[in-house]
Image: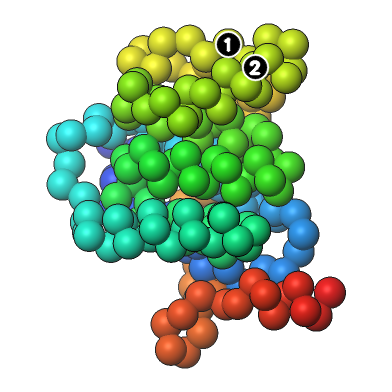
Amino acid sequence: MSESSRPTLDEISTVFAHLADRVAAERSRSLDPIIRLSLTRAVVELKHHIPGLYEPPDAGAAAAMVTASADALRRGRLRASLSRALRGLSFSPHHPELHYLAASACLQFGAAEEAIRLLQHALWIHPGYAPARQDLEALSAFHDSSIVPGDPDSGESALSNFEMIDPDRSQGSLWSDEDLEGWEGRSPDGEFPDDDAEDRAA
């Protein structure tokens, strides 16, 4: 893929926003395969935009989403936590804590490949980010060293038996996927759907 055909940072931010809506709107106990594939592809494409060279669209909103996502994660509201982390990434795509929170929620959903990719990206952005490195090393130990953290500064993904996408291979058109167009999972007052309602209905 030529550099001119790669998605811009604004386009990646838009994908994160669409994914946040989709995650919030769904009621499944697992993540939809389209969400998983699109999230991984977005993180792969994000590697082509160097942190620090771009001003976040809204750093303040991203910080608020860190708090909201972490609070939902502590309360076991995994879908709300992931949706809010993704919403935060639409405001600040290279925010390491948001990648870490998204990874934590993905892991709880059983989406190990996506969790690993997000943890690796958090370390690529901020090699000294201890929570991400500790979780990645714990996953490595748990899976008998099948995950090798590697050099987060290299811009390359760590070796892993859980790799889902080869960045150099075409994975279909994420950016024109009609399933990522126009999802609005928020309620009319702008709040995220209440995951507790899902639990009560189950």
Q: Quadrant of residue 114?
A: top right
Q: Amino acid at mark 2?
A: Ser
In the rendering, which numbered label is found on residue 65? Answer: none
Please give the name of the residue rendered at 43% of the width and 16% of the height, measured from the top-left corner: 156
Q: Is residue 3 above or below residue 69?
A: above
Q: How many marks?
A: 2
Residue 172 image point, x, y percent: 58, 42
Give the amino acid at mark 1.
Val
175 vs 148: above or below: below
In front: 135, or 121? Answer: 135
Q: Which residue is mark 1?
A: 148
- The answer to whether residue 21 is visible is yes
**Kind of element beneath mark 1:** strand
- Percent position of residue 57, x then y: 21, 56
User: Is residue 177 among what the camera can see?
Assistant: no
* Residue 63 horizontal side relative to residue 163, left or right: left
The residue nearer to you, when weighing 22 against 104, is: 104
Q: Which mark is residue 140?
A: 2
Residue 91 percent coordinates (x, y):
30, 57
Instruction: Determine the CA span between mark 1 and mark 2.
Output: 7 Å
User: What SS does tag 2 mark?
Assistant: helix
